[in-house]
Structures are given as C-alpha cells and as structure tokens.
C-alpha cells in the first residue's frame, strides 16, 4: 500500500497559494522521501540540488518544515563550490538566467568564459542572491570601474556577510558608500583614495550605529584634521561619541555646545585668582643681625694686652 501524505487544511489554504510551484513539489517529495538527501530529491524531480536546498530553507523560514540534514546542502561556505558543465548547462536553460548572462556580457563588455558563468551562478546558488540583485551587483562594480570577476566576487561575498540579500538593501548600501563614505573621505582631505576596511568600520558606525547626520560627521572630521594635523578616524570617533552622548542631532546643536563651552571658559578666566601666601620666615634667621665695629674691638684687645 502506498504511503499517504497528510496536509492540513490550514497549510493548503495559507501556504500553498504563496509558495513557488517548484517549492511545493520539493516539499511534497521531501515528505514522501523522509530519509532522502538533497541529491536524491533533485534526481527524482529532475531539478538542481541547489533548488532543493533553497526550497528547504524557504519552508524552514515559514516554520512549516525542518530541512533534511545532509552533507550535500550548500549553505554559505568560505569558498565557492565548483560547478560542473552539466549543472551550468541546466542553469542556462532558464529564460531568466539566459537574460542575466546576456546582461552580464553587455556590462562587462566581453564574452563570458566558463569561469565567469560559474561565478555568476555561484552568486545565485552559493550566496543565495536573487537574479535582480546579481544584476545590481554587476552594475555597481562596473560603474566603479571594476569589471574583473574576481573583484565582483569579493564584493558579492562582502554583501552576503553584511546581509545584503535584496535590491532594496543593496540600494541603501550603495547610497551609503557613494554619498556617505565619499563625503567623509573628502572631509578628511582624502578624496583621492578608497577607504580601507578599518576606516569603513568607523564610517558605518557613525552612519548606522550613532545615526548622526552626514554634515555633523563631516564637521567632526574637519575638526580632527585642524586639531591634530592628520587623518585620525579614532580621534574623530571620540568627538562624535561625545556629541552623540550629548544628544547632538544637527550642526546647530554643536554650535550651542560651542557657545556654552566658550561661556564657561570665559567665566573661569574672569574669576579672581587666589592671593599668594607670604613665605614663612626661617626661625634660624628671623632676628636682627648686630653691626660690629671691628676697629673698636681691636682697640679693646690692645688695651687688655697692655694691662698684662
């Protein structure tokens, strides 16, 4: 007798209409083959193994089913997996994939190699990027003058680590870099170079954690250079941290703090200075010294000798 699969009415009415058809098929096959790994289910449905893993993650996020644990599951790895010709050929059959590769070829200005296609496929399969996000990634890198796939892959990995997995998040990130980062570097007098990793960490803190306006951050950078004579992100951070703790939201708030500081300094300068106490006399020299008449003494001494 064939094994029956039970589905709740709530699941059928609420989940099935929202789920991609492929994910529904994978869900049902996973229920039917409870002990099967991703490779087995992919073989049964004639789909990619990566699609199975992606479907499992979808249902897990929906708190509907726990993904089957399998060594074949491709979650985020430190190194991009190697894809075979058969898997890439299957990938290129889909119209959306074909269009993405054509777009990539136009943006990069060259025919795509097997390695290029493997990398782009990796953005989708390995990093889990939607196709429209991959297109944004390519546009962003090319607009900055970088067309090498190795560089583009490094940017993609950085996005994945920062949780940039939608076009909306990518747009926010790009705006922060192009507007925020560039403006801050210019305020430091460093518009001719890209920030290093440590400098980016400071700028992200100021923009995202401190949530300070860009003109306030720029003012702190300018004051840093004026007061120290050099570029110091740590010094600027100390200024911004004090301003944040003081509740600064605008440049006007900073001007108010400056006036208050100047007034306090002026009051302190106008206060009378304490009188200096007279030095204590040394008791060994605190007497009137006698004035001796040495000629008279000598005369007395002669008179005394004459008596003898």
Image (cartoon, rainbow, N blue to C red):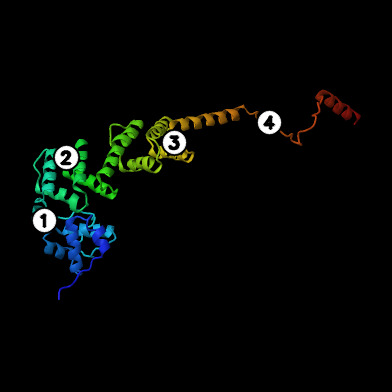
State the residue at coordinates (27%, 60%). Answer: 60
Circle nearer the N terminus (4, 2): 2
Q: Position of residue 18 (x, y in %)?
A: 23, 54
Front residue of 258 and 11: 11
Disc 1 marks which residue?
Answer: 87
Q: Residue 159: where, in percent of width, then height? A: 26, 46
Quadrant in which the C terminus appears: top right
Left or right: where 284 falls relative to 1: right
Q: CA distance from mark 4 to mark 3?
A: 46 Å
Give the mark toward the camera: 2 or 3: 3
Given residues 220 and 26, the one toward you in this image is 26
Label 3: state its secondary structure.
Answer: loop
Q: Residue furthest bottom?
A: 1
Q: CA distance from mark 2 to mark 3?
A: 40 Å
Tell which circle, 4 or 1, labels the residue nearer the N-terminal end. Answer: 1
Q: Residue at x 19, y 38 (%)?
A: 142
Nearer-N-terminus badge (4/3) = 3
- Regarding mark 1 in the picture, which secondary structure is present there? helix
Can you identify the residue that label 2 sits on? 147
Residue 16, x across and y down, in percent: 22, 58
Is residue 65 shown to the viewer in this render? no
């Amino acid at each position: 007798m064939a094994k029956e699969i039970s589905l709740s009415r709530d699941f059928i009415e609420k989940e099935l209409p929202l789920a991609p058809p492929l994910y529904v098929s994978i869900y049902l096959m996973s229920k039917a083959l409870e002990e099967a790994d991703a490779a087995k289910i992919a073989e049964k449905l004639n789909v990619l193994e990566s699609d199975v893993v992606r479907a499992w993650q979808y249902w897990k996020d929906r708190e509907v089913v726990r993904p089957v644990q399998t060594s074949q599951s491709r979650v985020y790895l430190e190194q991009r997996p190697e894809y075979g010709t058969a898997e890439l050929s299957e990938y290129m059959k889909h119209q959306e994939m074909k269009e993405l590769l054509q777009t990539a070829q136009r943006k990069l200005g060259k025919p795509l190699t097997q390695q290029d296609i493997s990398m782009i496929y990796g953005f989708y399969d390995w990093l889990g990027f939607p196709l429209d996000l991959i297109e944004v990634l390519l546009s962003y890198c090319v607009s900055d003058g970088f067309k090498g796939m190795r560089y583009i892959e490094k940017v993609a990995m950085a996005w994945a680590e920062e949780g940039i997995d939608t076009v909306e998040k990518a747009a926010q990130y790009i705006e922060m870099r192009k507007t925020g980062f560039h403006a801050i570097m210019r305020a430091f007098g460093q518009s001719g170079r890209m920030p290093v990793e440590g400098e980016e960490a400071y700028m992200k803190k100021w923009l995202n954690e401190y949530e300070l306006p860009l003109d306030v951050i720029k003012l702190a950078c300018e004051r840093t250079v004026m007061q120290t004579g050099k570029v110091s992100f740590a010094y600027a951070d100390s200024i911004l941290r004090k301003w944040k703790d003081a509740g600064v939201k605008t440049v006007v708030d900073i001007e108010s703090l400056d006036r208050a500081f100047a007034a306090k300094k002026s009051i302190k300068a106008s206060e009378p200075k304490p009188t200096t106490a007279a030095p204590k006399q040394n008791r060994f020299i605190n007497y009137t010294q006698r004035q001796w008449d040495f000629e008279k003494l000598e005369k007395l001494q002669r008179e005394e000798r004459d008596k003898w």
